[in-house]
Amino acid sequence: MNPKQDEKFNPRRLREARLIRGLTISDLADHIGVSKQAVSQFELGEATPKPETEMSLVNTLKFPRSFFYREYTEQHVGNTFFRANATATKRSKESQFHKSLLAGYIYDYLAEYIEFPELRLPDTSRYLESDWHNDLIESLTQDVRDYWGIGDQPITNMVQLMERHGIMVFSIDTDSEKVDAFAQHRKGRPFVFLGNDKQSAARRQFDGAHELGHVLMHKDIDNQDTLTRIEFKQMESQANRFASALLMPAEAFAKTVTSTSLLHFVELKRYWNVSIAAMLYRCLDLRIIDESRYTSLVKQMSMKKMRKREPLDDLIPLQEPVVLKKSILLLLEKGIKNELQLIQETSVPQEYIEMLCSLEEGTLNLKEPEPTIKLIKK
């Protein structure tokens, strides 16, 4: 899409692009050679950048020119639940949030051509209590397993399980060790974003289940930023308990813990697809081990340098979202759209379409047609 003469520069798109790139107003002003006040005026719609300034914005922010003229369908985004370290900066969270808006633009575009899986979530209306105590959380995870027909079996791929039941899952480079994943309540269906940075399959399993916990338990929380530090910690603790109980159902899990040696938990990791650290904490919660044994095992992990990188982390493949990837590849394979059309018609940079939709880098590079050859008739 090329801007038409009657279309106007959209100040909201400029702010989005700046925040996605993690720049302050001063940073952007320095890059394009204008004053901080000028950038503020552009973002407030009080002034329009001159053509040469506009091209500097395009080249600096690396967004298609058409992006700055787009008036996308307004996205209804409820609360965004960041699985983030308490020290995660406001700028980092803002950057991730605005990347999620790009995900929405891509989703809306693809939804015109693709019939996505129906959203199937268990009814939680019987859980009227806002205080999600442990027994209620355990009950909710059993409801999920029953509704999705999992029984008491290990969940081998949490990512595709959510996708199969209509939750949109995106991959995202968070550019921060302090933001692992986040979920959003949206009109229609929830979005879950899983960080690509320094992940293991076991950690991604837990992140996915944690975000599902937010989707099911905390949809009535309007704004996470209004919570006190204690309330936020409580909410995160509830989502962690949900993930733990969903991935390791109490009775079935307990039956498999036939030893409390560290080596045994390495073997259990193959079966439950959950980190050793998470299994140890689950054992403590279920009173399979006491505080003393738990502390001893954690110390052993530290001595063996297993806290950051556990055994099998390099061997178990990372679960990738597939629904959006398959959607784009289907449009390409059927000739409904080509690579250039996908980029032009969404106005989203190629790198973000590929990242958010788990496509290999370069998938949307424009393909040159192969030369044709003919046999000489004799």
Image (cartoon, rainbow, N blue to C red):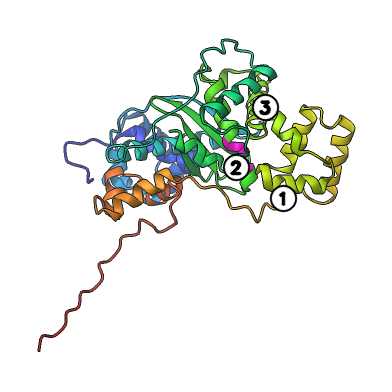
Tell me the distance, in whole angstroms, between the alpha carbons under discs 1 and 3.
22 Å
Q: Main secondary structure of the magenta part?
A: helix
Q: Which residue is mark 2?
A: 204
Helix, strand or loop status at disc 3 = helix
Q: Is any atom of residue 91 visible in this view?
A: yes
Instruction: Point out the image quarter for the N terminus.
Output: top left
Residue assigned mark 3: 241
Secondary structure found at label 2? helix
Write the residue at 20% across / 36% down.
Answer: 7
Which tag, 3 or 2, sits closer to the chain's start?
2
Which mark's residue is nearer the viewer, 1 or 3? 3
Does residue 94 appear to the left or right of 83 in the view shown?
Answer: left
Identify the magenta region.
Answer: 203-208
* Residue matched to label 1: 309
Depth check, front residue: 350 or 70: 350
Residue type marked 2: Arg
Q: Say whether disc 2 or disc 1 marks the residue closer to the N-terminus.
A: 2
Disc 1 packing (10 Å; few <14; some 14–19; many ≥20): some
Cα–Cα gap, marks 3 and 2 = 16 Å
| In this view, 251 is above or below 315 | above
Residue type at the position of mark 3: Arg
346 left or right, relative to 316:
left
Label 3: few (<14), some (14–19) or many (≥20) C-alpha neighbours in 10 Å: many
**Residue 151's image quarter?**
top right
Q: Which mark sits nearer the N-terminus, 1 or 3?
A: 3
Q: Residue at x 44, y 48 (%)?
A: 31
